[in-house]
Amino acid sequence: MAKFKFRLQSVVKIKEIQEKKVERELAAIKKRILQGQARLEDLQGEHEKLVSSSPLEGRIRAADIVVHQDYIRKISDEIRFESVRLENLSRSENKKIDEVLDAKKDKEAIEHLREKRLEEFKHDLDHKEQILLDAVAQRMSSQE
């Protein structure tokens, strides 16, 4: 009995490798987003704490107030920076999701083609077997 060989099997393997690579990249982006969100929450908590507290109790020097205000501005800048970074990561995540979906579609299209070729192979094999059985039956009937 003949064995089915799909000529595009190497393409299927390449598509699977590409799909897994893009999925790993997506997972890395999601991890960076979670880390960024945690950092942003920490910064926002620190900012709220600084804004609600006074720089020093008792005697307050102008230099202490300036340092306190500068630190608040620094935290605010870091919050803005982290927010922009998260927006960029979110856009990257959406692009990677699209890439994953495209890779899955490509692989599925080739798999569908493989299944179709396998069905054709089976049909041809059945047809050849039927021809062989008919020939055997005809020989047996002619010998009687």
Image (cartoon, helix red, strand yellow):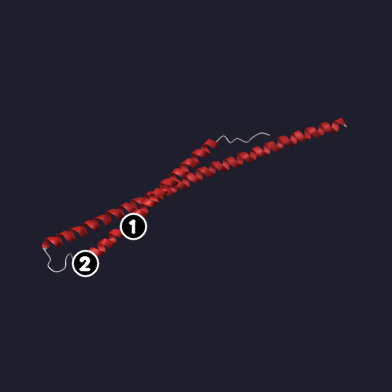
Relative side of 84 to 98, left or right:
left
Q: Residue at x 75, y 34 (%)?
A: 131
Q: Is residue 68 above or below residue 90?
A: below
Q: Residue at x 30, y 59 (%)?
A: 42
Q: Residue at x 57, y 43 (%)?
A: 112
Q: Is residue 144 above or below residue 103?
A: above
Dot 2 crowding, Cα within 10 Å, few <14, some 14–19, many 20+: few
Residue 64 marker: none
Q: Residue at x 61, y 39 (%)?
A: 117
User: Which tag, 1 or 2, sits closer to the chain's start?
Assistant: 1
Q: Position of residue 95 (x, y in %)?
A: 40, 48
Question: Disc 1 marks which residue?
Answer: 38
Total numbered labels placed on residues in the image:
2
**Element type at mark 2:** loop
Looking at the image, which is closer to me, 2 or 105?
A: 2
Residue 53 marker: 2
Looking at the image, which is closer to me, 110 or 61?
A: 61
Question: What kind of residue is marked 2?
Answer: Ser
Relative side of 125 to 22, left or right:
right
